[in-house]
Amino acid sequence: MTTFLLLHGFQNHRPPGHWHHWLAGRLAERGHEVRYPQLPEPDAPVLDDWLAALREHLEPPADGAFVVVAHSLSVLLWLHAAARTPDDLPVDRVLLVAPPSPAVTASIPEIAGFAEGLDLSAVRLKAPARLVYAAGDPYCPEGADVPYGIPLGLDSDLVPGGGHLTPDSGYGEWPSVLRWCEDPATRVGPR
């Protein structure tokens, strides 16, 4: 059994139509432990509050692997944690999905604090991490490999035409993410 921690993004109230919600259900059906917390104030998030909530959910399981699947703003949450306290991230691997670019994040007042002080040169990813992003993402128009993938040396999967990889772009069920969760050698592709 593996323990999965699913971390949502800005304004996400864990709706049933989102691939995170679908993934949580499929993983639980397969006998895995799933942690899918509602992070504080998702419509007006505060970085320090989200970091505190993250720490609450990082208790390693007694047995089995510990895997994080972060989407959108929670990718920046994870990167802040990896820059500040990398030794306090006791996970075996991480999937970083559709992070917003630093410029876009800084331009949205409610989340601008997540762009401030994020020094990628200080990020220490102790566990293997894979970046998944899509062409045509309005929150990262340059492609997430430019601000994150290349500077951090991440293994990356580009999803053609996936937008921000949300239900609005057709991402409710996403079988390739489920396959990656159980086999990290799986490439993540279109739904």
Image: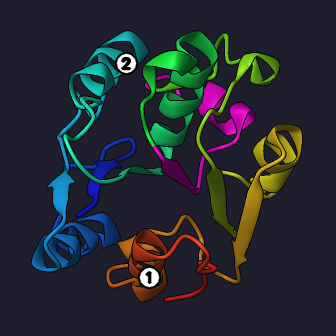
Q: Is residue 124 visible in the rendered structure shown here?
A: yes
Q: Is residue 55 above or below residue 153?
A: above
Residue type at mark 2?
Leu
Dot 2 falls on a residue whose secondary structure is helix
The residue at the point 27 percent across, 34 percent down is 60
Q: CA distance from mark 2 to mark 1?
A: 28 Å
Which numbered mark, 2 or 1, is in the foreground of this view? 1
State left or right for residue 93 relative to residue 178. right
Quarter of the view holding residue 118: top right
Q: Residues within 10 Å of mark 1 (few under 14, many from 20)?
A: some
State left or right for residue 115 relative to residue 172. right
Q: Is residue 56 above or below residue 94?
A: above
State left or right for residue 124 relative to residue 71. right
The residue at the point 17 percent across, 79 percent down is 30
Q: Is residue 112 above or below residue 66?
A: above
Q: Quadrant of the N terminus?
A: bottom left
Residue 94 among magenta residues? yes
The residue at the point 55 percent across, 70 percent down is 184
Q: Earlier in the sequence, mark 2 or mark 1?
A: 2
The residue at the point 28 percent across, 34 percent down is 43
Q: Which residue is mark 2?
A: 51
Instruction: Tell me the number on the disc at residue 179.
Output: 1
**Region rendered in magenta:** 92-110
